[in-house]
Amino acid sequence: MRNQILIPTILASALALGFAIAGYTQEKTEVRHIPAPNTDIASGVAMYGAYCAVCHGADGKGNGPAATAFKVAPTDLTLLAKKNGGKFPDFKVSNAIRGDGSVTAHGSREMPMWGDVFRDINRDESKVTLRVHNLTQYIASLQQK
């Protein structure tokens, strides 16, 4: 279990370092698309580290090492409840993660449609739903009080 969390964390750290180095050597960071790792389906923390932190930052404030590569800055995930009258918008966040509907996270389609990525990892729709749910719950835990 520890290795399942450690490996995505190491991968995210390596990606972050790569993006940070790229940012110092180029005017604008270039985002490389790599296959998504298969993280622990039960761990919102591991999924966030592997899939979200490189753009949204480890703290969720939109300051990840790849943030400068985008036309529109990644959303500060810690303010979602505050911007929604104090209630965390579970449904909207789940839809943004899945890539469902007309949700355009970041004002564009630069954010991956993680639902499709999760289906590529495992076609079992119940596992896709569980991933989205656990990741959504972790993002809810990042909210500023």
Image: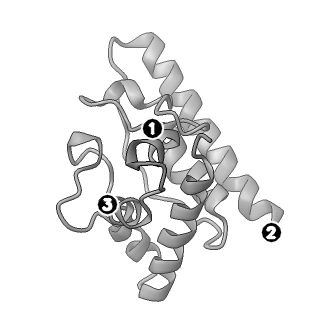
- Which is closer to the viewer, label 3 or label 2? 3
Q: Which residue is mark 3?
A: 113
Dot 2 amino acid type: Met
- CA distance for labels 3 and 2: 27 Å
Q: Residue at x 62, y 62 (%)?
A: 44
Q: Is residue 5 left or right of residue 44?
A: right
Q: Position of residue 12 (x, y in %)?
A: 59, 43
Foreground residue among 102 and 145: 145
The residue lying at 49 percent from left, 28 percent from top is 63
Q: Tag 2 or tag 1, which sits nearer the N-term?
A: 2
Who's the residue at 45% across and 36% down the image? 76
Report the residue marked by disc 2.
1
* Image side of residue 79 versus residue 109, left or right: right
Q: Position of residue 136 (x, y in %)?
A: 51, 62
First in residue order: circle 3 vs circle 1: 1
Query: Which of label 1 and label 2 is nearer to you?
Result: 1
Location of residue 71 by image quarter: top left
Circle 2: element type: loop
Residue identifier under label 1:
55
Judge from the rendering whether residue 26 lies leftward or rightward of residue 52; answer left or right. left
Give residue 68's position: percent from left, percent from top. 37, 24
